[in-house]
Image (cartoon, helix red, strand yellow):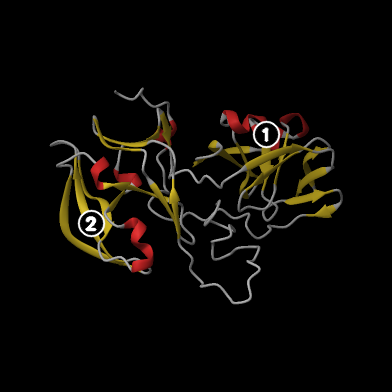
Amino acid sequence: MGLSWQQGPLSTGAIGRFLVPEPLPKRLLYVEPLRRRMRVRFGESWIADSERVLLLFEPARYPVAYFPEADVSPQVLKRTEHITQHADLGPTSWYSVQADEQHIAARGAWQHTNLPSHAGDLQGLIAFAWRAMDAFYEEDERVLGHAADPYHRIDIRKASRNLVVTHQGRVIADTKRPLVLYESGFAPRWYVPRADIDEAALAPVKLQTFCPYKGLCSYYSIGEARQAAWSYLDAYPEVRRISNFVSFEPDIVTVHLDGTQMSLAAGQSVVPHGPDRNLDIAEVAPAPTPVS
């Protein structure tokens, strides 16, 4: 997703290539200033507040925010004996994060302690485990799921192409007014208006997932074809055009676009990865206004 995830240029499955005479290393790490104020809330306290956050991009991971130690509240971090080894950045020391007596995260933060010379930008910086903290904010807006990738982009275009969805001979959808959503690192996804769908064929399932860029996603089965379709019933304002439209999995049901059968293209699969997955649906509920 974006720069280093899915099929981005720094990912392990990039669809493009750098036009250079010699092969690049298989793993490229990239760091840059976020250039946004970011805050971390744990319990009732703001434990970090910085305009000097660095984002680390590494292959097959979402970007990770690193805070200068001076921008972390004093006495919050307690070094533990737990040490891990990062494949590229060396030994990593873990901290317990304590906001008060009730809010303690045993391994809530980490720091790379013996960085190679070429990675000195991360010297002395602290990263917080996303799932261990209560909330992250950019200015006064909560950021859910993981640090937002500034290279992630979504474009939505209307089309007049004929998209037909069938399953076991039954026409599920037939439209000449689909929307196509282009998202960084993913192949295009086609969305169908409800009026052009046989909604009696859609059986809602309990599964819901969350996209930091589009919002809360609901799923449908079609007969025995489980999770064959999905919809963002109330998509984020930035992608409001797909709200309540339905998209179909071309590897589960049959989808034709202008008579050509579609297949699951490389980059269309969403692969859960890292501590920022398995989000609780409660996390997408409206957050309280930050305390000054």
Q: Which residue is mark 2?
A: 94
Q: Secondary structure at mark 2?
A: strand
Location of residue 196 (image quadrant)? top right
Residue 93 image position (x, y, % from top left): 23, 60
Residue 95 image position (x, y, % from top left): 21, 52
Q: Is residue 166 visible?
A: yes
Amino acid carrying label 2: it is: Trp
In the rendered image, the residue lying farthest to the bottom is 22
Q: Secondary structure at mark 1?
A: loop
Q: Is residue 233 visible?
A: no
Q: Earlier in the sequence, mark 2 or mark 1?
A: 2
Q: Count neighbours of disc 2 (C-alpha within 10 A) and say few if under 14, some if 14 to 19, many if 20 or more.
A: many
Report whether 158 appears left or right of 44.
Answer: right
When the figure is inspected, residue 253 is found, relative to residue 172, above or below; the finding is below
In three-dimensional space, the C-alpha distance between marks 2 and 1, rounded to whole angstroms, equals 44 Å
Residue 94 image position (x, y, % from top left): 23, 56
When the figure is inspected, residue 247 is found, relative to residue 56, above or below; the finding is above
Q: Which residue is mark 1?
A: 245
Between 269 and 255, which is closer to the camera in this rendering?
A: 269
When the figure is inspected, residue 233 is found, relative to residue 254, above or below; the finding is above
Residue 163 image position (x, y, % from top left): 80, 43
In the rendered image, the residue lying farthest to the right is 259
Amino acid carrying label 1: it is: Phe
Q: Residue at (58%, 28%) from the top-left corner?
A: 237
Q: Residue at (80%, 44%) from the top-left corner?
A: 164
Report whether 237 appears left or right of 288.
Answer: right
Q: Count neighbours of disc 1 (C-alpha within 10 A) and say few if under 14, some if 14 to 19, many if 20 or more.
A: many
Q: Residue at (60%, 63%) from the top-left corner?
A: 14
Which mark, by number, is residue 189?
none
